[in-house]
Amino acid sequence: MESTLMKRIWICSKFMVLALAAALSTGVSLPAAADDILPPAQAERPTILGLGVVYRDKTYKGYETSKEWSAFPLVVWENDRFFVRGTSAGWKAWSNETWSFDVLAEFVGEGYDSSDADILTGMDDADPTVQAGVALGWRSNGWGVRGVVAHDVANVNEGWEARAELSYTHVSDNRHWVITPMTALVYQSDDMVDYYYGVGASDAIPGVRPQYDADGEFTYRLQTVAAWNPGGSKWQLFLGGRVDVQGDEYDNSPLTSTDLFWMGFAGAGYRF
């Protein structure tokens, strides 16, 4: 029984990673942590397809304004066993009325091109990646708690990430509005932080970009997401905002100028 379950988990994880990798190969620009930005499908589990625009102000010094905006396809779908929410896809391995355990894969939109800012000129690009892991969640009376542990399975940064999330979902009396504020504590391993914020000896420039080896570090996250469904309409509108307060290992990097990462999101989708 146990070996059968592990085999299913492995097959599902591999399938989701390949699916996300295929999507990334199209070159579509996607927001980081879109699984956080897009709320789960509601009780009737509609399929929602649409388009969104995201603003991301990364913490790299002199980050180019032209890089801050991007568009992406908006997808929300789920059934009894599987789900797709933006850049995250998963298998509902086990659940009851309050608890859930998912196996998931998610796109991580970290990284940069060397042309994104003057401070990065001459460095190798730091690529986004796909990570896979598990999520344990609890939900009752609008409150939700979720823990996620995921590892880089594309061997880009070879690191891992853990998140502890606390949220509250408010549904308006007419059920046209769903508003979900959330706070989270995010930990990224030393391999992950160093890949995106470290400076190797070959990339160091004395007095400008000194060598820097980063350790694992925490990020504190606050965000709010609102979904609006006009009465009787098949359209679903989304609006969200997020701020990350990054720890000292990010802030002390010679590549960064601030410890605040800002993100805004708006989109519209058609419900099938």
Image (cartoon, rainbow, N blue to C red):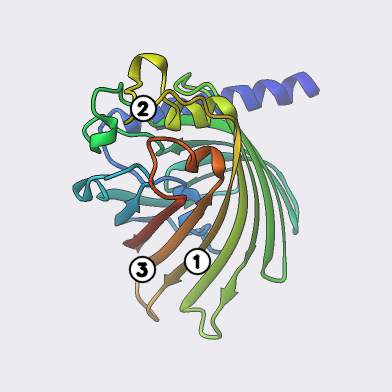
Residue under label 3: 237
The three-letter amino acid code for the residue at tag 3 is Leu
Label 3 residue SS: strand
Q: Provide the residue designation for mark 1.
A: 224
Point out the frontmost of discs 3 and 2. Answer: 2
Measure the C-alpha gap from mark 3 to mark 1. Answer: 14 Å
- What is the secondary structure assignment of the residue under circle 1? strand
In-front residue for pair 12/104: 104
Answer yes or no: is residue 38 visible.
no
**Circle nearer the N terminus (3, 1):** 1
Percent x, y of residue 195:
46, 26
Mark 1 packing: few (<14 Cα in 10 Å), some, or many (20+)? many
Nearest to viewer (mark 2 / mark 1)? 2
Q: Residue 197: x, y in percent?
A: 44, 32
User: CA separation, marks 3 and 2?
Assistant: 33 Å
Circles 2, 1 touching at the beta carbon (< 8 Å): no
Amino acid type, residue under disc 1 in the picture: Thr
Q: Which residue is mark 2?
A: 126
The answer to whether 139 appears left or right of 10 in the picture is right
Left or right of 154: which side holds 138? right
Report the quarter where the N terminus lies.
top right
The residue under the point 42% across, 48% down is: 86
| Camera-side residue of 138 and 214 | 214
Task: Write the residue at 52% across / 72% down.
Answer: 179
Q: Using the image, determine if residue 260 lies above or below residue 119.
A: below
User: Residue 216 at x, y = what percent?
Assistant: 60, 32
Q: CA distance from mark 2 to mark 1?
A: 28 Å
